[in-house]
Image: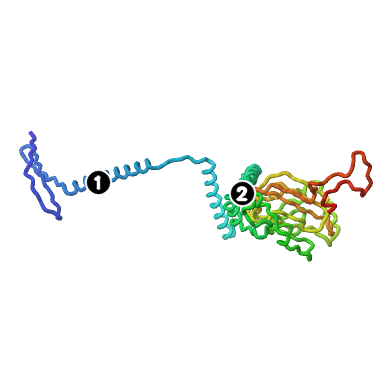
């Protein structure tokens, strides 16, 4: 019969730790054996102490977090604000990436899906909405912060404008359409063609094989740009038969801070004016490097005629947030009146109408 008995406990000293030894004995067929079982009280107690401390620390941390969350005041924001913030962050990310590519000498040409996605953007609707906002009359106390910030950001030279005081502009659109002082620009009489507006030259050169370069390496069709049934067809025949004449082009980009009225670049006769509805994509130089035929997609007004050397054309191209193109050279004054009667027979050169400006 087996019997289990416990012997007396003995305390031993080992490595400065208190070790307890308990003797457990068993009897097998009259032969007794003793087995020592050793355990460290200090180690076990230390483990339980550290475990209890970690539990209490976790509970305290959880309680602190819950108390802090209860003090927060939550409020909702429109989804459009969050979407605009994400777009803003993505814009700067793409901008920095393109800068790195440019410094590394890599190609900036986008993929086809990027161009297709860009063309699907509702640029016309956005331009109309922003134009309506910009034409809202601002209270006098709000004009300087808004219009002044726009002027500072885009480095507008207000001293050249007829109206130098920002608070006298009723809206941001009125400031955008500001007029220059008569002596703010000097017209060069020694050149046969002058700049029609304030802006940056994107590209210039000779038109070859009906192709015009919008930027270096990216071209578009001049016939598509000017539209069908233009005098350009006869012009090409004239150029082919005359080695002394060539066709040239120049593209000028008007930035947001530039004076945005444009004038005649030379003395010429306008024979035709055509309006082409289209998109309002941005014509920023960075976009012009990406989308081939960008100017053919945008809304534009094409003026064609002749000058002393032959064919001449001048085109105003709309852009994102700049979709209004107004021509004043073919408009009549508000006090114009007809000097004829219904059924009256006229001869060449006889007066038909006049205004007060004509009599002054």
Query: 45 left or right of 203?
Result: left
Q: CA distance from mark 1 to mark 2?
A: 59 Å
Give the secondary structure at mark 2.
loop
> In what element is the residue under mark 1?
helix
Q: Horizontally, is 148 left or right of 245 in the view? A: left
Q: Is residue 131 above or below residue 313?
A: above
Looking at this rendering, what residue extends furthest in the left direction? 30
Q: Position of residue 270 (x, y in %)?
A: 82, 52
Give x and y (percent) for residue 16.
Answer: 14, 55
Residue 359 vs residue 279, the one in the foreground: 359
* Residue 293 seen in the figure: no
Pair 1/2: label in front? 1
Q: Which label number is shown at residue 25?
A: none
Q: Quadrant of the N terminus?
A: top left
Counting residues from the start of the chain, the first of labels 1 and 2 encountered is 1
Which sits in the foreground, 211 or 161? 161
For disc 1, the marked residue is 53
Which residue: 50% across, 41% down?
77
Where residue 94 appears, as percent x and y from the top left, is: 56, 52
Q: Is residue 350 visible?
A: yes
Point out the residue furthest to the top here.
1
Please tell me the numbered disc located at residue 111: 2
The crowding category of the residue bearing disc 1, from other C-alpha atoms within 10 Å (few below 14, some 14 to 19, many at least 20), is few
């Amino acid at each position: 019969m087996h019997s289990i008995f416990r012997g007396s406990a003995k305390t031993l000293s080992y490595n400065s730790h208190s070790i307890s030894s308990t003797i457990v004995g068993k009897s097998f067929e009259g032969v007794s054996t003793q087995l020592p079982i050793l355990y460290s009280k200090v180690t076990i107690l230390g483990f339980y102490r550290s475990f209890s401390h970690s539990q209490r620390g976790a509970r305290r941390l959880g309680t602190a977090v819950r108390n802090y969350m209860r003090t927060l005041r939550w409020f909702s924001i429109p989804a459009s604000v969050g979407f605009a913030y994400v777009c803003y962050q993505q814009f700067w990310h793409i901008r920095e990436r393109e800068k790195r590519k440019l410094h590394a000498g890599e190609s900036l040409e986008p993929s086809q899906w990027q161009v297709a996605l860009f063309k699907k953007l509702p640029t016309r609707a956005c331009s109309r909405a922003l134009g309506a906002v910009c034409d809202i009359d601002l209270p006098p106390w709000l004009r300087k912060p808004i219009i002044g910030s726009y002027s500072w950001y885009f480095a507008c030279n207000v001293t050249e404008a007829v109206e130098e005081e920002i608070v006298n502009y009723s809206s941001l659109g009125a400031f955008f359409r500001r007029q220059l002082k008569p002596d703010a620009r000097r017209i060069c009489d020694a050149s046969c063609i002058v700049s029609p507006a304030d802006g940056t030259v994107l590209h210039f050169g000779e038109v070859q094989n009906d192709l015009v370069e919008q930027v270096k390496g990216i071209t578009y069709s001049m016939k598509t740009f000017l539209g069908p049934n233009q005098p350009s067809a006869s012009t090409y025949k004239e150029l082919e038969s005359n080695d002394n004449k060539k066709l040239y082009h120049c593209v000028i980009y008007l930035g947001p801070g530039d004076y945005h009225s444009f004038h005649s670049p030379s003395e010429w006769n306008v024979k035709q004016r055509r309006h082409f509805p289209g998109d309002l994509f941005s014509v920023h130089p960075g976009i012009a490097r990406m989308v081939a035929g960008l100017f053919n997609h945008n809304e534009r007004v094409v003026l064609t005629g002749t000058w002393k050397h032959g064919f001449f054309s001048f085109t105003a191209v709309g852009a994102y947030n700049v979709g209004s193109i107004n021509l004043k050279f073919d408009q009549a004054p508000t006090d114009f009146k007809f000097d004829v009667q219904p059924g009256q027979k006229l001869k060449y050169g006889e007066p038909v109408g006049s205004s007060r400006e004509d009599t002054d």
